[in-house]
């Protein structure tokens, strides 16, 4: 079952392919994306990686192994992605 990781403190020049290649060393990567500013199109320093979780402990293992590793001299922060909070309807 696919699971999504939230990855932040990325170097601003990291692209989705580099992020995928980094995580492919530790899990089967389905897709990755870097979040960009809507106006400038520049990286906001975080992204998401969707991995295939073959066993229940895979997600935790990948988080433990990759959290604190470096890309481009920056120490990554990795956690399980949470869904967007639901907005309350306007009154």
Image (cartoon, grey):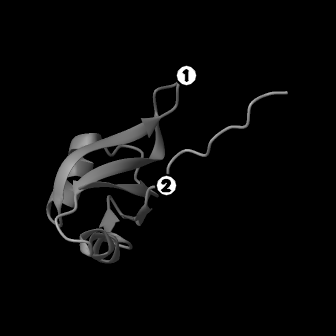
74 to 64, vertically: above or below = above
Residue linked to disc 2: 82
For disc 1, the neighbor class at 10 Å (few under 14, some 14 to 19, many from 20) is few
Pick the residue in front: 45 or 29.
Answer: 29
Instruction: Give the percent coordinates (x, y) of residue 14.
Output: 32, 46
Residue linked to disc 1: 39
Q: Is residue 52 left or right of residue 7?
A: left
Q: Residue at x 37, y 48 (%)?
A: 48
Instruction: Give the percent coordinates (x, y) of residue 9.
Output: 46, 58
For disc 2, the neighbor class at 10 Å (few under 14, some 14 to 19, many from 20) is few
Q: Residue at x 41, y 65 (%)?
A: 78
Of the residues under marks 2 and 1, which one precedes in the sequence?
1
The quarter of the picture where the C terminus appears is: top right
Q: Secondary structure at mark 2?
A: loop
Q: Secondary structure at mark 1?
A: loop
Instruction: Give the percent coordinates (x, y) of residue 40.
Output: 51, 25
Q: Residue at x 46, y 33 (%)?
A: 42
Q: Quadrant of residue 25?
A: bottom left
């Amino acid at each position: 079952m696919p699971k999504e990781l939230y990855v932040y403190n990325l170097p601003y020049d990291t692209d989705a392919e580099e992020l995928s290649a980094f995580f492919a060393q530790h899990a089967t990567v389905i897709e990755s994306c870097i979040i960009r500013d809507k106006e400038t199109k520049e990286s906001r320093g975080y992204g998401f990686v969707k991995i295939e979780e073959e066993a229940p402990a895979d997600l935790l293992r990948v988080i433990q192994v990759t959290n604190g590793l470096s890309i481009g001299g920056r120490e990554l922060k990795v956690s399980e992605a949470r869904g967007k909070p639901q907005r309350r309807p306007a009154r």
